[in-house]
Image (cartoon, helix red, strand yellow):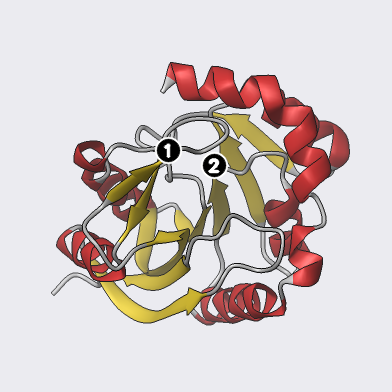
Amino acid sequence: MGATADAYDSVAVLYDELFRDALDTRPLDRALLAAFAELVRTNGAGSVAELGCGPGQVTAHLRDLGLDAFGVDLSPVMIDIARRTYPDLRFDVGSMDALDLADGGLNGIVSWYSMIHTPPKHLPPYFTEFRRVLAPGGHLLFAFFASEEPVTPFDHKVATAYQWPVDVLAEMAREAGFVEVSRMLCAPQEGERQLPQGRLLMRAGRAG
């Protein structure tokens, strides 16, 4: 993971320039994030974490949707940019598979393309950690590159990344204690990498 953090440190400024306004041209994603925010509020008060927040644009959007949102990222340079751009929001350097958060302390998690570089054998513990820090009934929104085939690596500009069959990710989340709420497949937009894009919305199961 250190190599991935270093790689994103080196491109953080360019990444921020390219993606700061990305949601402006993605009405379906804005609608899904709004639905996520409504579900989070329905479950009661509590913070929402964007894990793998990069320069913080999605965290800020969650704040604008009325959520008590903060961001966590492995890249110190990304976190520095986020703090400068959104000084009213909290951003922490940290690893998504070992969060410095209490059990059940969150009401929502957004992971927006933040685990695309995680090798398949290392991914299940992330879902386990997400379930640990989510309160029962809390929601997880997960964005990724999708595939109809078995898990497929591809040459990402920053580091090797992976495409995932939606069913495989949904089952992995279920084994960690999540219940699927909805799924969405999106075609890439003009100018984007020509890979299908997936969204999974899940709810942390309640005990008993």
Which residue is identified by label 2? Answer: 52
**For the point 19% across and 66% down, which residue is it?**
171
- Earlier residue among tags 1 and 2: 2
Q: Which residue is mark 1?
A: 96
> Which structural element holds mark 1?
loop
Residue 87 or residue 26, whichever sits in front: 26
Question: Picture quarter containing residue 15?
Answer: top right
Do the numbered discs 1 and 2 sit on residues whose CB atoms are within 8 Å?
yes
Looking at the picture, how far across and down is residue 78, in whole percent?
69, 30
Q: Is residue 129 left or right of residue 32?
A: left
Where is residue 173, by image quadrant? bottom left
> In front here: 155 or 30?
155
Q: Quadrant of the C terminus?
A: bottom left
**Local crowd at mark 2 within 10 Å, few (<14), some, or many (≥20)?**
many
The residue lying at 51 percent from left, 51 percent from top is 113
Q: From this viewpoint, is residue 87 visible?
A: no
Query: How far from the left and from the top, in percent, is residue 52?
Result: 54, 42
Residue at position x 69%, y 74% from top?
A: 30
Under circle 2, the secondary element is: loop
Q: Amino acid at mark 1?
A: Met
Question: Count of labels shown?
Answer: 2
Q: Position of residue 35 (x, y in %)?
A: 58, 81
Choose between 115 and 163: the one closer to the eye.
Answer: 163
